[in-house]
Amino acid sequence: MNIPILIIQILFMIAQKRFDAVIDRMEAIDRYCSRYLKQDENYRCNVFIRLLLQIPKAHFHPQAIRPRAERYLAMLRQQPLQISPQGHEIEIVPFEDLWEMTGATLGRKGG
């Protein structure tokens, strides 16, 4: 269950506008993914994390994130969510929906 926990931590920090913490955490998550996640077994998780990595690369600016995100969103759409009995592959909220919520959060003013 490490992956969902890491993802939700990032999403909470984004919602709280703690962007420095997001940058630090994303670097750690990127290293974690490259070491422990197998591309074929955790495809959607890998893609979603790569999608989240675009946020700090675009300096948390919603309009700058959109073009960077399209490639990864297309990859998620090509590999639809399948219900899996294994806990590490569960998406309580589909990643496509989480992405929409994240974009809405970034678009809001204030903290």
Image (cartoon, rainbow, N blue to C red):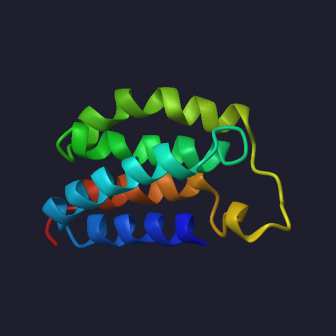
Q: Which residue is at the front of the view, 50 or 40? A: 40
Asked whether, in this view, residue 50 is left or right of residue 26, the answer is right
Residue at 85% from the left image edge and 68% from the top image edge:
85
Asked whether, in this view, residue 70 is left or right of residue 37, the answer is left
Can you say whether 95 is above or below 72 in the image? below
x then y, percent, for residue 15: 29, 69
Q: Quadrant of residue 29?
A: bottom left
x then y, percent, for residue 95: 58, 54
x then y, percent, for residue 89: 71, 60
| Number of numbered discs | 0
Q: Which residue is at the front of the view, 75 or 43? A: 43
Can you say whether 87 is above or below 44 in the image? below
Quarter of the image that includes the N terminus: bottom right
Among all residues in the image, which is located at the extreme front? Answer: 35
Residue at 74% from the left image edge and 71% from the top image edge:
87
Residue at 25% from the left image edge and 33% from the top image edge:
64
Quarter of the image that includes the C terminus: bottom left
Q: Which residue is at the front of the view, 84 or 94? A: 84
Asked whether, in this view, residue 48 is left or right of residue 11, the answer is right
Can you say whether 16 is above or below 70 in the image? below
Residue at 62% from the left image edge and 65% from the top image edge:
93
